[in-house]
Image (tube, grey):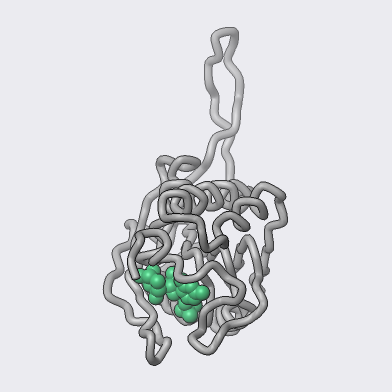
Amino acid sequence: MGEVFIFDHPLMKHKLTLLRDKDTGPKEFRELTNELAMLMAYEVTRDIPLEEVEIETPLTSTKSPRIAGKKIGVVPILRAGLGMLDGILQLMPAARVGHVGLYRDPDTLEPVEYYCKLPPDTENRDLLVIDPMLATGGSATAAIDAVKSRGVRSLKFMCLVAAPEGIERVREDHEDIDIYTAAVDDHLDDHAYIVPGLGDAGDRLYGTK
Ligand SMILES: O=P(O)(O)OC[C@H]1O[C@H](OP(=O)(O)OP(=O)(O)O)[C@H](O)[C@@H]1O
Ligand SMILES: O=c1cc[nH]c(=O)[nH]1
Ligand SMILES: [Mg+2]
């Protein structure tokens, strides 16, 4: 059974407060989203496998650990997930990047898939699906379905703000997936927006509406 990890680091909490503030504009919102994603990815990758390799320091030869196996695959859910990508790539510049294009139909609230391109050999990589918001969980579930259907070895989901309803949905549909979030909020409103939340993440990142 997958687990739910809720981060409680003071730096993350502070940045999330700034992100939630309605007066935070797109430039600062983008910066904070990337900073939070980088801090979270640092913890999410704590179990990456290592291998010992022989190297020469200026003084001697020694064995030292380095990351083993194929590069991790990071899969943002378009469009808001892209806002987290650069922060993660700063930490792991060699990561491979896949994209799943989904939007939530405003009337039915059902996810509509319009794009999927993943790195090769997904079945031999650790994959991390990212999206700032986990609301009803429909988009995350659909993205995980899309990735799983191509074959995966290990898959984690990382978001900034989750609603209890979204966590429950993902756990029901994908009980093997670990979920990482910086916060679990109170509830969804009548339009399935997370309360207190931070509004529409895509619109705030890109200044649309
Ligand atoms: O859990 P759910 O109820 O499915 O809602 C969450 C989804 O909604 C937002 O995307 P949106 O549909 O606004 O698309 P966008 O990223 O292109 O703005 C968000 O980035 C998630 O993908
Ligand atoms: O609160 C929400 C819910 C879905 N999508 C968002 O961007 N925000
Ligand atoms: Mg949006």
- Direction bottom: furthest residue: 108
Give percent across and percent down for residue 181: 61, 63
Looking at this view, name the residue that lies furthest to the top: 59
Residue plotted at (34% across, 71% down)? 209
Observer-nearest of 133 and 69: 133
Above or below, 198 against 70 in this view is below
Q: In percent of the image, x 65 and y 51: which residue is there?
A: 14
- Image coordinates for residue 80, horizontal then vertical, percent: 41, 64
Ligand 1 picture quarter? bottom left
Residue depicted at x 53% and y 40%: 67
Image location (x, y in percent) of residue 72: 46, 51
Give me the residue at 36% from left, 66% from top: 78
Q: Classify residue 148 as left or right of residue 36.
A: left
Question: Outermost residue, front direction?
Answer: 23
Image: 57 above or below 41: above
Q: Quadrant of residue 172?
A: bottom right
Reply above or below: 27 against 162. above
